[in-house]
Image: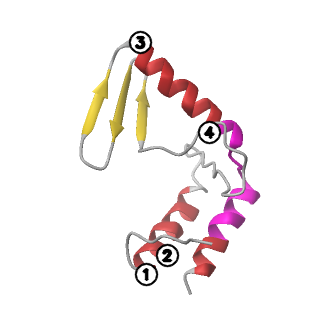
Amino acid sequence: MLRYRLCSAETMAAQLGHLLGAMDLQNVAVGVVPLAAHRAVWPMPTFTIFDNRRVHADTLDAASTLTQPSQVELYARAFERLSQQAVRGAASRALIADAVASLA
């Protein structure tokens, strides 16, 4: 169930629908960390790791490009821990479908 909405229910449903469609692509892997999962790492602002040499990290008020090996490694470890907590396949599809249903 989605408790906090940053946009309208219609917009959120469209975004989640797009995510469900993207999950069918061979070059896309989607993992969802369930709200009930025990967290080794708490969710944080978004980040993207490029070639293990650069991280683009977003916060609410700024974006940073990190290139120091220690910074890149920190984000790589965070991603690995989040990935271990994520469910994939039918389980992630079910969580997303439940979220869409909760918007009605």
Q: Amino acid at mark 2?
A: Ala
**In the image, farthest residue toward the bottom:** 104
Q: Nearer the viewer, mark 4 or mark 2?
A: 4
Q: Secondary structure at mark 4?
A: helix
Residue topped by disc 3: 69
Tag 1: Cα neighbours inside 10 Å, few (<14), some, or many (≥20)?
Answer: few
Q: Measure how far apart labels 3 and 1 are at the Cα level.
A: 41 Å
Residue topped by disc 4: 82
Q: Measure how far apart labels 2 and 3 are at the Cα level.
A: 38 Å
Q: Secondary structure at mark 2?
A: helix
Q: Nearer the viewer, mark 1 or mark 4?
A: 4
Residue topped by disc 2: 13
Point out the tag, 3 or 1, that comes first from the N-terminus: 1
Task: Give the residue drawn at x 55%, y 81%.
Answer: 103
Q: Amino acid at mark 3?
A: Pro
Label 2 close to label 1 by CB (< 8 Å): yes
**Left or right of 64 in this view: 25:** right
Q: What span is in magenta? A: 83-97
**In the image, farthest residue toward the right:** 90
**Position in image of residue 33 (x %, y %):** 65, 50
**Prevailing secondary structure class for the magenta stretch in the rendered image:** helix
Q: Amino acid at mark 4?
A: Leu
Query: Is 7 colored magenta in this rendering?
Result: no
**Position in image of residue 40 (x %, y %):** 66, 36
Q: Amino acid at mark 1?
A: Glu
Instruction: Give the quadrant of residue 1.
Output: bottom right
Residue topped by disc 1: 10
